[in-house]
Each structure stands twice: as structure tokens, then as C-alpha cells.
Image: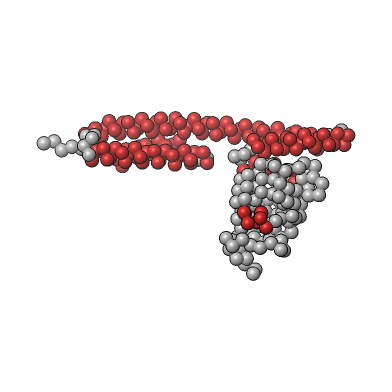
Amino acid sequence: MEKKQKPNWQSILEQVWGTVREALIPHPSKEQVIWAIRIVVALAVVVTLLICAIRRDLIGSDNAAVIGALLALVGVLITQVVSANVARALEDQRARAASLQSYLNWMGAFLTDSDRADNDARAKVVARAQTLAVLEGLRSDPTRKRSVLQFLNESKLIRSGKPDIDLAGADLRGAYLREAHLNEADLRRAKLIDADLSGAYLNGANLKETNLREANLSRTDLSKVQNLAQAQVDLAIGDENTKLPKGLERPKAWPEDEGA
């Protein structure tokens, strides 16, 4: 009696993974990594079902070649889907870059406009609208959000006291602001949810009603910020190196202050 040949699952999976890997390497983006995880989970489910079917004699082991071909076809289809998503992600990146460049060009003209003094109030309204719009468009781009905020602060457009541009409601969620220089920045009522502010320079910054939920304040010196409330601190994430203004208490979930 001819011995049935068992399918070489390791070889089959290696072929499929090779196809997937070619679509992701050498520079996988966040979107690609997410798709890779989905693909691995889907393949694991398919392979598990096939193994169970073979063990229960629902599929003959002599059909291993057919099964391998089907899995290879799935791999090709997955590669096409991944490639399409990569192309879409690249197009989104180009669109965000173009949007940011257009904004910076407009703001450059705003800063050098000789007629600005005559129409100051109207110009500020337009500048605020432009700023909020570009930040909304950069929702999934933490690094470019940093570029916008740094530009505004270095141009002294959001300096605390009398800012030219009001950032109330500005979408700075997830912004990458690690070690960013934001001294004296007016961040009142801005949305800094899940932002990375670790080690950021915030001396004199106005944080009145700023949404700091899940914001990373590790290694951040907040001792000289303005209008920070306990409720804001309680929603943020700090570590033993986070320094708070006098009168505010460290949340119990935070590690103890090294200097305590």
C-alpha cells in the first residue's frame, strides 16, 4: 500500500511568509506592520483549519500540493493587498507633506505681510483657521505636528500672554514632542491626548485646560508651567523624574520622585 505523503507545512509557510516579507522589507511603515499582523493571524487560522481537516480525514494528505498551491495563491493576493495599502500610505504621506509645505508658505507670507498691522484681527482669525486645519489633516502624522508647533513657537506666534494664534481645540493628539522646546508656549485648551512630551521644555508654558489624557510626561519638568491643575496631572503619565509645580500631588500610579 502506497504511503500517503504528509504536507510539508513548514515549507508552505516559509513560501507564504517569504512573499509577505518581500512586500514589507526593507522599511516597514506602521500601516505595513499592522497589515503584517493581520496576515499572520489569518494564515495561522487557515493553516490550523487545514491541519484539523486533514487529521479528521476531511481532506486527503495526498492533496498537499493542491493545498500548497492554494496557500501560495493566497500569499500572492495578500501581497497585492499589502502593496495597494503601501501605495495608499505613500500617497497620504505625500499629501501631508504638500499640505504642510503649503501651510508654511502661507504663514511665511503672513509673517512678512506689510499690511498685517492694518488687518491684524482678521489676519489672526485666518491664521488660526489655517493652523487648526493643517493640524487636523496631520492627525496621523506625529512628527509633522511637531514641526508645526515648533514653527509657531519659534516664530513667537503662540507665546503665552498675548498669542497671535489661539490653539484652543487644536488637534495635537499623539504628537511627537519629545524634548521639544516649547518654553512660554500658549497651549491653553489644546488637545495633547496621548502626546509624547517626555523631556519637553515647558518653562512658562500656559497649560490651562489643556487635555493631557495619557500624555507622556516622563522626565518632563513642569515645575514652572502656568495654570496646570491636579485633574490634568491625574490623567497624564509620569515617572520618577517628572517634576510638578508646588501644590500639586503626584498620582499614586506614578513612580516616586527620585528627589523625594
Q: Given the current orientation, which residue lies at the most extreme right position?
A: 118
Quick one: 85 or 193, which is closer to the camera? Answer: 193
In the rendered view of the protein, which quadrant contains the N terminus?
Answer: top left
Say if residue 46 shows up in the picture: yes
Q: Position of residue 226 (x, y in %)?
A: 75, 55
Say if residue 176 shows up in the picture: no
**Residue at 71% over, 63% down:** 247
Q: Position of residue 60 (x, y in %)?
A: 21, 34
Quick one: 135 or 5, which is closer to the camera? Answer: 135
Q: Is residue 96 above or below residue 242?
A: above
Image check: 96 left or right of 38?
A: right
**Residue at 29% over, 33% down:** 67
Q: Position of residue 123 (x, y in %)?
A: 81, 35
Q: Is residue 95 above or below residue 207?
A: above
Q: Position of residue 80 (x, y in %)?
A: 44, 30
The answer to which image quadrant residue 7 occupies is top left
Quick one: 47 or 253, which is closer to the camera? Answer: 253
The answer to which image quadrant residue 46 occupies is top left
**Residue at 77% over, 45% down:** 158
